Image (cartoon, rainbow, N blue to C red):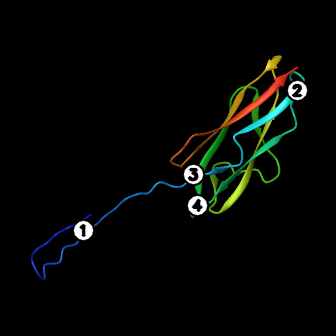
Amino acid sequence: MVYDNAEINNAQTVKLVGHGNQGALSISTGSLSFGKQPLNTPSSAKFVKVANRNPVAMSFSAATSGDYQVTTGADACPASSLPPKTACKVWVTFTPTAAGSRPGELIFTDDAFNSPQHVKLEGIGK
């Protein structure tokens, strides 16, 4: 912003207020593959690492589609907010309800400019 005032000794004050976009959460992978899994039997859990490299906490949520479920595990992410400069894991299991290819997604919704972020989930029901 440029403010031009030709008068000498006539100080002007302009208050500027704004909000910048927070940086994105860092997601460790774009896809998880669970291979072949017996019908209606949960797989072993796999994880996606999530890092907040920002100087402030970021609110986020993780949800799945298809035959996939978010579950608990070591270093699991907190329920709603990731503190600044920390990382955690979102654990996912696959329980196929039908035979064949069973695509899905892990969807991260957060405060970042690029929200939501998607992780492709792949598994085969047998």
Task: Give the farthest residue toward the bottom.
Answer: 9
Determine whether 14 is above or below 9 in the image: above
Q: Nearer the viewer, mark 1 or mark 3?
A: 3
Q: In which quarter of the image is the C terminus?
A: top right
Q: Is mark 4 on a helix, strand or loop?
A: loop
Looking at the image, is mark 1 or mark 3 earlier in the sequence?
A: 1
Give the quadrant of the N terminus.
Answer: bottom left
- State the residue position of label 4: 54
Q: How far apart in space, not on screen, are marks 4 and 2 (Cα)?
A: 38 Å
Farthest residue, direction left: 7
Q: Which of marks 2 and 1 is nearer the N terminus?
A: 1
Q: Decide: is 119 above or below 122.
A: below
**Label 3 CA crowd tier, 10 Å (few <14, some 14–19, many 20+):** some
Q: Is residue 34 left or right of residue 28?
A: right
Q: Is mark 3 on a helix, strand or loop?
A: loop
Label 2 secondary element:
strand
Residue named by callout 1: 14
Q: Residue 61's spot in the image, x, y percent?
A: 63, 43
Badge 2 amino acid: Gln
Q: Mark 2 points at which residue?
A: 37
- The kind of residue on which mark 1 rests is Val
For the residue carrying disc 1, how many other residues have a C-alpha within 10 Å: few (<14), some (14-19), or many (20+)? few
Neighbours of disc 2 within 10 Å: few (<14), some (14-19), many (20+): some
Identified by mark 3, the residue type is: Ala
Circles 2 and 1, Cβ within 8 Å, touching? The answer is no
Q: Distance between the residues labelled 2 and 1?
A: 64 Å
- Dot placed on the residue nearer the N-terminal end, 3 or 4: 3
- Residue of label 3: 24
Badge 4 vs badge 2, beta-carbon distance below 8 Å? no
